[in-house]
Image: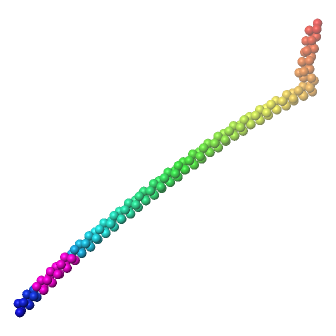
């Protein structure tokens, strides 16, 4: 009887062992599956992170290009303003030169006018002086004419 019980006990334990073995294998498979899923999830996560990084880089690149474009635009605008300023300065100098020339011309004309006026007054003064002294050139000329006329008539 004891032998039978022992056998039964042994078989029972054997079955128990097999059951546990199957359970262990099942858990092992479950663990492998979980690890696989975990690796899959990690890969997916890494891929997403890479994608995000790539997008971020692209965004930065576009931003950089945009900033470069704006910088070029600012430089161009600055250059244009500088050029316009130089042109205005040039025009201003040109205008000043023209103005100076005109002023010089006016001054010259005024001096000439004064000179002519002075000469005219001088001549007028001489004529008056001659009139006071008695006749002047015209009288002398007239006398010469008479003399010449008299000689001609003879």
Q: Quadrant of residue 37?
A: bottom left
Point out the residue furthest to the top here.
Answer: 154
22 relative position to 2: left or right = right
The residue range painted magenta reads 11-27
**Is 20 in the magenta?**
yes
User: What percent of the width, then of the height, locates residue 46?
Assistant: 33, 65
How many circles with numbers are drawn on the protein? 0
User: What percent of the width, then of the height, locates residue 114?
Assistant: 79, 34
User: What percent of the width, then of the height, locates residue 28?
Assistant: 21, 75
Q: Which residue sits at x=25%, y=72%?
A: 33
Q: Which residue sits at x=90%, y=21%?
A: 138
Q: In which quarter of the image is residue 129?
A: top right
52 relative position to 116: left or right = left
Q: Which residue sits at x=68%, y=39%?
A: 98
Classify the position of the C terminus by image quarter. top right
62 to 89, vertically: above or below = below
Q: Which residue sits at x=79%, y=33%?
A: 113
Magenta stretch: dominant secondary structure: helix
Point out the residue furthest to the bottom here.
Answer: 1
56 relative position to 120: left or right = left
Classify the position of the N terminus by image quarter. bottom left
Q: Quadrant of residue 119?
A: top right
36 to 127, vertically: above or below = below
18 to 124, vertically: above or below = below
User: What percent of the width, then of the height, locates residue 66?
Assistant: 47, 55
Q: Quick one: 95 or 1, which is closer to the camera?
A: 1
124 relative position to 44: left or right = right
Q: Quick one: 41 or 150, which is closer to the camera?
A: 41
**Is 143 in the magenta?**
no
87 to 43, vertically: above or below = above
């Amino acid at each position: 009887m004891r032998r039978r019980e022992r056998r039964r006990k042994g078989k029972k334990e054997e079955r128990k062992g097999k059951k546990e073995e199957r359970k262990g294998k099942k858990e092992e498979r479950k663990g492998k599956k979980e690890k696989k899923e975990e690796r899959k999830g990690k890969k997916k996560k890494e891929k997403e992170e890479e994608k995000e990084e790539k997008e971020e880089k692209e965004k930065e690149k576009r931003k950089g290009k945009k900033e470069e474009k704006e910088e070029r635009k600012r430089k161009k605008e600055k250059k244009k303003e500088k050029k316009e300023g130089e042109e205005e300065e040039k025009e201003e100098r040109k205008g000043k030169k023209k103005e100076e020339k005109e002023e010089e011309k006016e001054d010259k004309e005024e001096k000439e006018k004064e000179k002519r006026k002075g000469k005219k007054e001088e001549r007028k003064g001489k004529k008056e002086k001659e009139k006071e002294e008695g006749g002047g050139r015209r009288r002398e000329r007239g006398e010469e004419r008479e003399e010449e006329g008299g000689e001609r008539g003879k």
